[in-house]
Image (cartoon, helix red, strand yellow):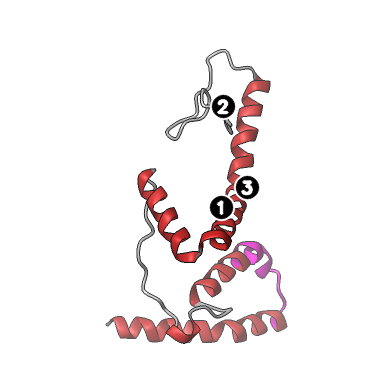
Amino acid sequence: MQLIDTSTFTTETVNIPENCTMHDWMQIHRSILLCKNAASKWLAQSRAYAVGKWGNEWTADAEAQLELDLGLPQPEAQPSLNPPDKSRGIVTIEGLSQKFELWQRKMEDEITTWDTDRLNRALELLTPFEAQAARIRSLLG
């Protein structure tokens, strides 16, 4: 079973023929975008299948070995910023940061149009973050 056209796609490059038409290029690029969009869903479904059939430990070991075999970059170990008993909780500092960055990107232009009440409310909500960041900066010396 061949899943992709190996004359076009390899693990190192995409081969686009010199005589490629606009339509051909759009089909190739559409395939790439589809794969990009679907990859995380496919990985999650594949992992769930393997975990259900052979267990979490075997799946994690197998996936790590496959990633090594393919030369994929290994994730760097990052220190946990949450207590051990809460590291699987709903809210983590990493999650808060991601949500804040998303909010900031969406609201950046609009903030300049806010009235005093909205500005004060935003400042009230952001002050604990600012205070904690100052505390962490002081601990760094």
Residue type at mark 1: give it.
Leu
Q: In the image, residue 140 lies at what x, y percent?
A: 30, 81
Q: In the image, residue 87 lies at what x, y percent?
A: 48, 79
User: In what quadrant of the picture does the C terminus appear?
Assistant: bottom left
Q: Tell me the element at label 1.
A: helix
Q: Tell me the element at label 3.
A: helix
Q: In the image, residue 36 lies at what x, y percent?
A: 58, 44
Please give the label number shown on residue 43: 1
The residue beneath circle 2 is 5
- Residue plotted at (65% across, 84% down): 120
Q: Residue 97, relative to residue 53: is it above or below? A: below
Q: Tell me the element at label 2.
A: loop
Residue type at mark 2: give it.
Asp
Please give the label number shown on residue 6: none
- Residue plotted at (51% across, 64% down): 55
Please give the label number shown on residue 38: 3
- Residue plotted at (59% across, 57% down): 49
Residue type at mark 3: give it.
Ala
| For marks 2 and 3 on the same chain, the one whose residue lies earlier in the sequence | 2
What's the magenta region? Answer: 104-116
